Amino acid sequence: MNILWDFDGTLFDTYKAFTNVLHEVLKGSVPPDEIFLELKKSFTHATAFFQLSEDQIAEFKLKERAISPEKKRPFPFVEDVLKQSNLNVIMTHKPREEVQTILDYFGWNHYFQEIVAGDDGFPRKPDPTAYRYLHDKYKLDLAVGDRVLDIVPAKEIGLHTCLFQNEGEGADFYLDTYEDFYITIKI
């Protein structure tokens, strides 16, 4: 199976770290569980929802980049899926350097044929341009993401879709853990 992966919240459990940083930026004025819910929609959404100033956004980005990859661990069993797949690619809004830092830390570069990162010039999701590019090049079977935003472009170009730890409408498959990935996903 050839799989397109989102990065944050799909391969790596990064939202806990993001939540802690935004909680700090907001000086503890918003409960972490509320921050988490808004961040899961998107960072852009959260900045508008919490009415962050440009200085607060810059502070968040600076502090988030400084977090050790140790605090951005891969989800359990996802490496098993990567090992069994024929091919894996990543499409993320995260800057390439940050993606590479985490992949390098965990020794995971060899699992991915290609990475389309946020600073590669492609339009942001839900625009399907990057998905179409990767699909045309690698003949993908499935797109896995943690937000509906991740599956919209996949649906548009005809890929099967899987939402991870999200029950939003529209996915072909839903998973809370990667432990039974190949049992659950039958394409």
Image: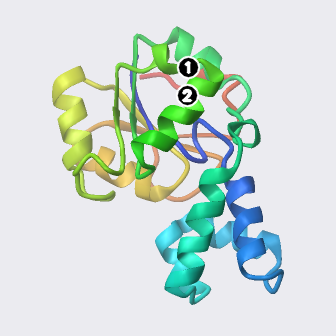
Q: Are marks 2 and 1 in contact (CB under 8 Å)?
A: yes
Q: Secondary structure at mark 2?
A: helix
Q: Residue at x 61, y 69 (%)?
A: 60
Q: From where the camera sits, is residue 17 visible?
A: yes
> Which image quarter: residue 160?
top left
Q: Residue at x 45, y 40 (%)?
A: 97
Q: What residue is shown with label 2?
A: 103
> Which image quarter: residue 159?
top left
**Cα–Cα gap, marks 2 and 1:** 5 Å
Q: Earlier in the sequence, mark 2 or mark 1?
A: 2
Q: What residue is shown with label 1?
A: 108
Instruction: Name the spot of residue 2 as percent of width and height, x first.
Output: 37, 20
Number of residues whose C-alpha sits closer than 10 Å to that of mark 1, classed few (under 14), some (14–19) or many (20 or more): few
Q: From where the camera sits, is residue 184 visible?
A: no
Instruction: Name the spot of residue 115 as percent of width and height, x first.
Output: 36, 32
Q: Residue at x 83, y 78 (%)?
A: 31
Name the kind of residue labelled 1 in the image.
Trp
Which quadrant is home to the N terminus? top left
* In the image: residue 84, left or right of residue 63: left
Q: Secondary structure at mark 1?
A: loop
Q: Is residue 111 above or below residue 149?
A: above
Instruction: Name the spot of residue 96 as percent of width and height, x first.
Output: 41, 41
Instruction: Name the spot of residue 174 as percent of width and height, x first.
Output: 58, 41
